[in-house]
Amino acid sequence: MLKKVQQAFAEQGALSKTIAGFKAREPQKLMAASVTKSIENGNALLVEAGTGTGKTYAYLVPALLSGKKVILSTGTKNLQEQLYFRDLPTVLKALALPVDTSLLKGRSNYLCLFRLDQHYQHVPTADAAVINDLSLIKKWSNETQSGDIGELTYIAEDSKALPLVTSTADNCLGKDCPSYEDCYLLRARKKAMQADLVVVNHHLFFADMALKDTGFGELLPNMDVVIFDEAHQIPDIASEYFGETLSSRTLLELCKELELICKTELRDHPQLSKTADKLATLVRDWRLLWSDEPERGNWRDSSKRPEVQLALTRVSEAMGMLYQVLKGSLGRNEVVDHCFERLALAKTQLEKLQDVSKTGVSFWYETTRQHISLHLTPLSIADKFRELVFAEKRSWIFTSATLSVDQGFAHYIEQMGLQQADTLLLDSPFDYAQQAMLLVPRYLPEPNDARMGKALLKLAVPLIEANQGRCFFLFTSHRMLQWMANELPQHLSLPVLVQGSTSKRLLLEQFVETKHAVLLGTGSFWEGVDVRGDTLSCVIIDKLPFASPDDPLLQARNEDCQMKGLDPFALVQLPQAVITLKQGVGRLIRDVSDRGVLVICDNRLVTRPYGSVFLKSLPPMRRSRDLQAAVKFLQDLPK
């Protein structure tokens, strides 16, 4: 097989003959050869492929030529669609292969015919926008072949109608559903079962692995090769799914469904409606014990508050009462039967989440404006993941532009239990010394100094003006982003786009179309965003992205590290911050012709010993501490 792969990447090979402008790079060929070897030997491989390596083709070509069954998992739905609709067809055409492929998303991405019918006939709100969206969805439901909600481009991504016409693992009726035979999710999963290559995302992969939900419980055993792209995200995602979570949203949705059934098919059962309503009221009262502003905190500590204990006792008792009423109603209606099963699961989860004496896990809570969720997260997934990977003879390939720290994989290997895996570290083929400059400005206050906002503003304005916009301004906190969103437009005549004002996709489209804008973003804009050419030639990062010291999961991992006599800063906080920074830096240079300036507004890069770990992990750009040198670099770029 290696010979076939090498021929595909050769100068006059299949890829260069059919893909305009394709020219294989040496790191790409090395990665393709390593992936081929891993697939042939059935072992695990970790590959860091620097930006511009062409890693997608480097794993797709061996995977497709292998003739084996492949699961390809990536970080987000957008990347899933890019792989499935753009990259995969391109490579399949070049290789002239008749490979059966399938795109599988999470269940909330597919229309649920039963819930559409239920809510279209009995609209649970007087909101005109929701009623209008339901009408549009109903019309689309008569035209769609796939039932993929992604086709509804004329409905807002956050429309309140969408949860009414999609299902969750909780409220899906399964084989008891009247629309079971026509279920779009079921069709998508059947297609995935028969496909040679299935494209999924990490959340779907681990949700189904952890929940033993119908799908991967059957799908994974048939697969010979598992490829994780954007593999740096896996430790956090897998931890989430190997733990326990219970949200007030889950309980309130359950109560809402029971109330709807009592208004339609079970009008003779007022006790059920009253009991569900009582639970819903007590769940809302429980949420009111925290402030309106979203927060995360330590559940071990918070659960000791007397008022929290009292509220949860009342919620628990109301769940017990509803459980008994539902038990007496079994067999009358499939929705009631399913709600009974969901409530039984929620009761068990709440019991686990109230037993905060358990060790080796973090107990934490998170609030949104309307809901609260409780979480139990294992501090390490290494043992469970090692068991999953090495249980059977199967190839597992983990790749990303950001897996290593300080030129090594030790941190990732330890997190994932992948001591038996092969490793490959490939530098980017881009000429960073010529293409980019790293500015670490002089005379900045310490990152948490109250004067930092004004200093950032004073620094950013001349850079943005010199570059005529075309800038990402990335923040580690929403607080600083909001402050800058208020101040920056007063000092610039250029458009300022702010994360949260509309969807991420629309913001990026506006940024590209406007050409001379500055985009302010936090977390989600640090990765998975690909803006090539001179549309983006300046990235400003407000400070080194260390996780908040108040983060309960970080606190628990730090404590666990200390108990083992190890240094939590060196082993937990620093590696995590390095990988996040590398992601942010990766937004700047996306192609061989890109040029630009990266600005990291944090003195600690040069004043603290650990600064060298960050610098060694970054591409080899020319460095400067002189603002005017960076301004001149930007002024000299073609506009």
Image: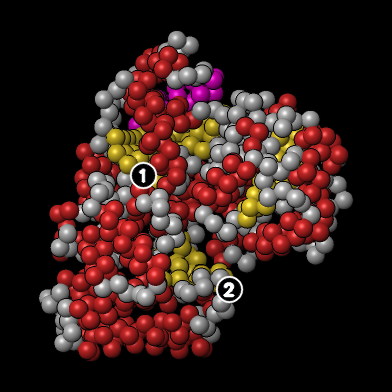
Task: Count the numbered circles shown.
Answer: 2
Q: Which mark is residue 223?
A: none
Using residue 591 as the reference point, say whether residue 64 is left or right of it: left
Q: Quadrant of residue 347?
A: bottom left
Q: Which is more toward the observer, 462 or 32? A: 462
Q: Is residue 92 above or below residue 231?
A: above
Give the extent of the magenta segment: 25-44
Q: Quadrant of residue 64?
A: top left
Instruction: Name the residue beneath numbered marker 2.
Output: 293
The kind of secondary structure the magenta stretch mainly shows is helix
Is disc 1 placed on a helix, strand or loop?
A: strand
Q: Which mark is residue 200?
A: 1
On the image, the x and y values in percent for residue 143 come to 25, 49
Using residue 587 as the reference point, say whether residue 386 is left or right of it: left
On the image, the x and y values in percent for residue 420 come to 44, 37
Q: CA distance from mark 2 to mark 1?
A: 34 Å
| Residue located at (26% from left, 54% from top) | 141
Q: Is residue 34 magenta?
A: yes
Is residue 29 something one can see in this rendering? yes
| Residue located at (27% from left, 80% from top) | 259
| Residue located at (31% from left, 62% from top) | 135
Mark 2 residue type: Glu
Is disc 2 placed on a helix, strand or loop?
A: loop
Mark 1 residue type: Val
On the image, the x and y values in percent for residue 155 come to 40, 56
- Crowding at dot 1, Cα within 10 Å, few <14 / some 14-19 / many 20+, comes out as many
